[in-house]
Structures are given as structure tokens and as C-alpha cells.
Image (cartoon, grey):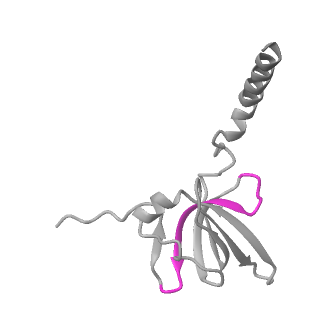
């Protein structure tokens, strides 16, 4: 019985130490004072919890392509804003507006995407205008 209690205590300590690994990450690395506009091609689109995401291949003026990783909100919020899991597909031409990372790495927090047909989607539902 003593060995069982010791194992329980050790297991509990491991769980306590592991808990911070499951905590939500900070947005301190995002520069919300600036917006970048990225015109490129969707490489991947992840429709998953807790955050959807997209990778966009963006060529610079010399033709060098950089893959930007764009973090989004959860599918539940995107659905309310008019999204579907099939809204973005690899190969789609898009223009993304996002808050860039402070450290200059090619990553950002999503604001909006304009699709090839000219429609723009955000993470928030459109507000109906009152007559």
C-alpha cells in the first residue's frame, strides 16, 4: 500500500508539472500596431481546434518565395463568420491582412483574407445593417 501511495504522489507531481504545457500561449509576440498585406498562394489550410491556420507562399519583388504561417481562431468562430472547412484550398490565390510577429519571422495573427473572386472573410460575422 505504501508503494501505491508513493506512485500516486509521483503521478500527481508529474501532472502538476505538465499542466503549464497545456496552458494557452501568449500573444505577446504579435505586433498589433502594424498590419502586413500578403499576396500569395495557399500552401495549406488547417481547420482544427484550438486554432485554425494557413500557410501562404508569398513571393517578394525578386521572386523569392517565403512561407508565412498565419494563426487564426477556432472553426466554431469561423463558421459563424461564414467559413467552411473547404473555404481555402492549396493553390488558391489570396491576399491576407494580418498582425506580424514582433521578431520578424514570417508568421502572423489573421485579420482578413480576400479570395480570388474578390470576397473578403474575417473571423467575425458580418454585422447586418439596420434600415
For the point 32% across and 62% down, the residue is: 127
The quarter of the picture where residue 48 lies is bottom right
Residue 37 among those drawn in magenta: no
Is 105 included in the stretch rendered in magenta? yes
Residue 82: image location, x then y, percent: 41, 69
Which quadrant of the figure contains the N terminus?
A: top right
Q: Residue at x 58, y 56 (%)?
A: 49
Residue at the extreme front: 1
Q: Quadrant of residue 43?
A: bottom right
Q: Position of residue 94 (x, y in %)?
A: 59, 79
Does residue 55 sit above or below 5 in this rendering? below
Q: Left or right: where does residue 125 sit relative to residue 26?
A: left
Residue positioned 60% across, 80% down in the render: 89
Q: Residue furthest top?
A: 2
Indicate whether 1 appears above or below 57: above
Is 13 left or right of 113, judged from the image as shown? right
Q: Position of residue 31 (x, y in %)?
A: 64, 51
Above or below residue 10? Residue 102 is: below
Where, quadrant-wise, is the C terminus in this rendering? bottom left
Q: Is residue 125 above or below residue 86?
A: above
Using residue 75 as the reference point, say whether residue 16 is left or right of it. Answer: right
Name the spot of residue 92 as percent of width and height, x first: 61, 83
The answer to which of 104 and 109 lies nearer the viewer is: 109
Residue appearing at x 52%, y 80% in the figure: 115
The residue range painted magenta reads 102-117
Count of numbered circles in the view: 0
Amino acid at each position: 500500500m505504501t508503494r501505491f501511495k508513493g506512485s500516486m504522489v509521483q503521478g500527481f507531481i508529474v501532472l502538476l508539472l505538465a499542466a503549464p504545457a497545456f496552458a494557452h500561449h501568449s500573444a505577446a509576440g504579435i505586433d498589433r500596431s502594424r498590419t502586413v498585406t500578403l499576396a500569395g498562394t495557399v500552401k495549406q489550410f488547417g481547420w482544427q481546434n484550438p486554432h485554425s491556420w494557413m500557410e501562404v507562399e508569398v513571393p517578394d519583388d525578386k521572386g523569392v518565395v517565403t512561407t508565412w504561417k498565419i494563426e487564426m481562431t477556432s472553426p466554431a468562430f469561423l463558421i459563424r463568420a461564414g467559413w467552411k472547412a473547404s473555404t481555402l484550398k492549396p493553390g488558391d490565390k489570396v491576399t491576407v491582412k494580418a498582425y506580424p510577429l514582433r521578431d520578424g519571422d514570417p508568421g502572423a495573427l489573421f485579420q482578413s483574407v480576400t479570395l480570388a473572386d474578390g470576397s473578403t472573410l474575417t473571423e467575425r460575422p458580418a454585422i447586418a445593417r439596420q434600415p
